[in-house]
Image (cartoon, rainbow, N blue to C red):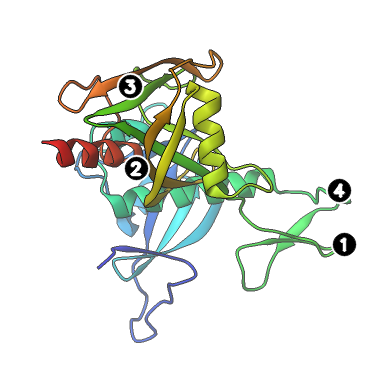
Amino acid sequence: MHRFISGKQFAVDQTTSNPTPYYVVLGEGDTLLATGDFPWRPLSEPQWRSLDIPASAQHLLGGYEGHPCFAVKIDTLSMPPEPFHWVGLRQLLSAQRILDDEFGMVGAALQVLDWEQTHQFCSRCGSPVGEHSSDRAKVCGSCKIHFYPRISPCVITLVSRDDHCLLARHNRSPSNFYSTLAGFIEAGESVEQALHREVAEEVGVSVKNIQYFASQPWPYPGQLMLGYTAEYDSGEIKVDGVEIADARWFKFNELPPVPPTGSIAGRLIQRFVEQHQ
């Protein structure tokens, strides 16, 4: 059973009086407030109140362990009081110190607060926007257009060739990991069309036998990663030099540093390794 459920699914149990809420407290970028305990958990009501810090924004995310859970934005504390400290979401993910439910919850918090900050005015007429009465949406008081949190679909693919897989080092990656190929789905494209295009653009090869694997929300800033596997068909590796710095075929038992299994890229690679061990 999931510990976190989204706001659309969550309704506070009416039989519970004064349900104790939880708080995902965010600072600059993807930094969040944590205690010394791992895996990471949101702050309890007493922990949040003990900080006595005003929130610049607050949104109900959904339910966590049957209680309401809020995303809270504050100005970063340079030295939070013990036992609190700031930690980046990527850092927690790389160290495998955050569970799937909590990763989804923090990702939702990042996306909702980013949407709140970037949708103060209507992009059609420039008027201030207000809150929708029931949906998570902004509504222009003048022209009545609705603005929902933006979700951008992306395709992410592990390409295999017998017991080798094609991994690439991305120019914009904050780490030196070799990872799977990925890209945004453009207007008018199917997922399969985007997959073929992205692989050809980034590494110059063509693929076949595309199979769906899984999906994962990815909050940088609001992507939905659609994971697939594909088999090599033809062509020689030729990196684009823009998004991809290097790409190579790696044998399943001779892999370079790769993403952690908390990410869908890491899980795609993990399954490939397990299939060939």
> Residue 100: x percent and y percent?
29, 51
- Marker disc for residue 252: none
Where does label 3 land, which residue? 177
Residue type beneath disc 2: Ile
Determine whether the residue tagged by mark 3 lies in a helix, strand or loop.
Answer: loop
Where does label 1 land, which residue? 143
Sequence-wise, the earlier of marks 4 and 2 is 4
Circle 2 crowding by C-alpha within 10 Å: few under 14, some 14–19, many from 20:
many
Sequence-wise, the earlier of marks 3 and 1 is 1
Q: CA distance from mark 2 to mark 1?
A: 40 Å
Q: CA distance from mark 3 to mark 2?
A: 14 Å
Mark 2 and 1 residues: CB-CB less than 8 Å, in contact?
no
Residue type beneath disc 1: Cys
Q: How many marks?
A: 4
Outermost residue, bottom direction? 15
Residue type beneath disc 3: Phe
Outermost residue, left direction? 277
